[in-house]
Amino acid sequence: MTRDYSQFLPPSASGNLPRKKTAQLEKLGWKPFFSQQLSLDDTSHLSPVRVTEVHRTGLHVLGEDIDTLLPPGPEATVGDWLLYDPQHPGSSKVLERSSVFERRAPGTDRKRQLIAANVDTVFIVSSCNKDFNIARLERYVALAFEAAVTPVILLTKADLCDDPSSYLARASEISNRVLVELVNALSAEPITKLAPWCKAGQTVAFLGSSGVGKSTLVNALFRDGVTDTAAIREDDSKGRHTTTRRQMHFTPNGCAILDTPGMRELQLTNVETGIADVFADIVDLAGHCRFRDCHHDTEPGCAIQAALDSGDIDPARFARWKKLAAEERYNSSSLNERKSAEKAFQKMVNAVQQKTRKQKG
C-alpha cells in the first residue's frame, strides 16, 4: 500500500529567485523567503552564505565559490543564512530565519542556546530499547511545532526487540499530526522511506539522544560514510557520543542534512504554543473549566479532573503536560527577566555616557 505523505510534507517554495548566484545557492537551500530580504545595495557587494558548522574559532560558511571560516561575530547557528561581507567578515548580517530550534542552555545562567535554523523537516530519532522515552519525544515534537517545522518520528533498532509494534503504537499516540516510521538504519530503507522529505532545496535535521542511530541514518542517505558511528552500551542501551558538533552535509540532489550531537538535556523555553499543540486535547478541555485560573487540581468545575475521573485522559500524560507547561513558564519568565535587566543596564550605561559627553563638551 502506498502511504500518503502529503499532510506531513512542508509547503513547496514559490516565488522568483535572484538570477545571480542562484544555481549553487539553491543546492544549499536558498529560497525566495531569503531572496526577498535582499536589497540592490546588498547584492552589489555582499554574498549570501550558509553556516554549515559552528566552531569555537568561528563559523564555517558556504556560498557561490565561497568556502571559508568567519571569525566570531554574529549570533548564528548551523543552517543560518548570512550576507557575507568580505571586507568586514565579522560584521556579516544574519538573515531572518524561516524557523529556529533553541533550548535553555545547560547550567544556571538560563541563557538560550541555538540548535539549528531554517529547517524544513526534523527527524526525531529514538530506538526500540531502553532509550525510548515518551516524555522526551513529546519535548522534541513541541520544539518542532513551535518552530513550525514538520516533525517525523523515526524508530530505529526494531530488529533488536521482540515487539517493535508496541513502540510504534506509543509514539503514534503523541499527536495525529506526526508521522511515525520504523526504520532499519543499517539497510537501504532510509533512502526510500525518507525520500518524500529529502528533496532538492529542502533542509532536514536529525535530533535525538546519543546512540539512537542519527549518524547511521545520515550515512545511509549518502550511501557512504560521512559521519562516525559507534555501538550502544549493552548493559543500559545508552549511546556513545560520535557526533561532537552540529554539521551540515549536502546530498548530490541538493538536500541539506544536519546531523546533531545527542542532547542529554532538552530544557524548553518560549515554546508555549508548541506544548499546547502536542497536548491539544488537554488544552481544549482546560478551556471548559469553570474558573479561568483553574489549577486542575481540586477546584470545582474542573473539566480536566472530570475527564480523568471518567478515564478519558491518561493520568501520566496529564502529569507530563503539567510538568512541561510549568517548566516552560519558569524558563521563559527567567529569560524575559534577564533580558529586561540587560536592557535596563544598557539604558543606564547610555545615559551615563551621554551625560559624560555633555560635560566634556
Image (cartoon, grey):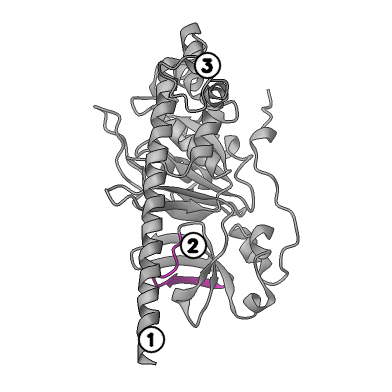
Q: Judge from the rendering whether residue 239 lies leftward or rightward of residue 168; answer left or right.
A: left
Decide whether residue 244 is among the magenta residues: no
- The first of marks 3 and 2 along the sequence is 2
Q: Judge from the rendering whether residue 10 lies leftward or rightward of residue 86; answer left or right.
A: right
- Identify the image quadrant of the C terminus: bottom left
* Gap in angstroms between the C-alphas marked 1 and 3: 62 Å
User: Where does residue 43 sit, x and y in percent of width and height?
Assistant: 65, 76
Name the residue type under label 3.
Ala
- The first of marks 1 and 3 along the sequence is 3
Name the residue type under label 2.
Val
User: Where does residue 244 sit, x and y in percent of width and height?
Assistant: 34, 51
* Gap in angstroms between the C-alphas marked 2 and 1: 40 Å
Farthest-out residue, left:
235
- The first of marks 2 and 1 along the sequence is 2
- The part of the chain drawn in magenta is 65-76
Q: Label 2 belongs to which residue?
A: 51
In this rendering, which labeled residue sits more in front, label 1 or label 3?
A: 1
Q: Judge from the rendering whether residue 231 lies leftward or rightward of residue 50; answer left or right.
A: left
Neighbor class of circle 1 (other Cα within 10 Å; few <14, some 14-19, many 20+) is few
Question: SS at mark 2?
Answer: strand
Q: Judge from the rendering whether residue 13 lies leftward or rightward of residue 207; answer left or right.
A: right
Quarter of image, res 269: top left
* Gap in angstroms between the C-alphas marked 3 and 2: 48 Å
- Identify the image quadrant of the N terminus: top right
Who's the residue at 53% across and 32% down the image?
Answer: 276
Question: SS at mark 3?
Answer: helix
Q: Label 3 belongs to which residue?
A: 303
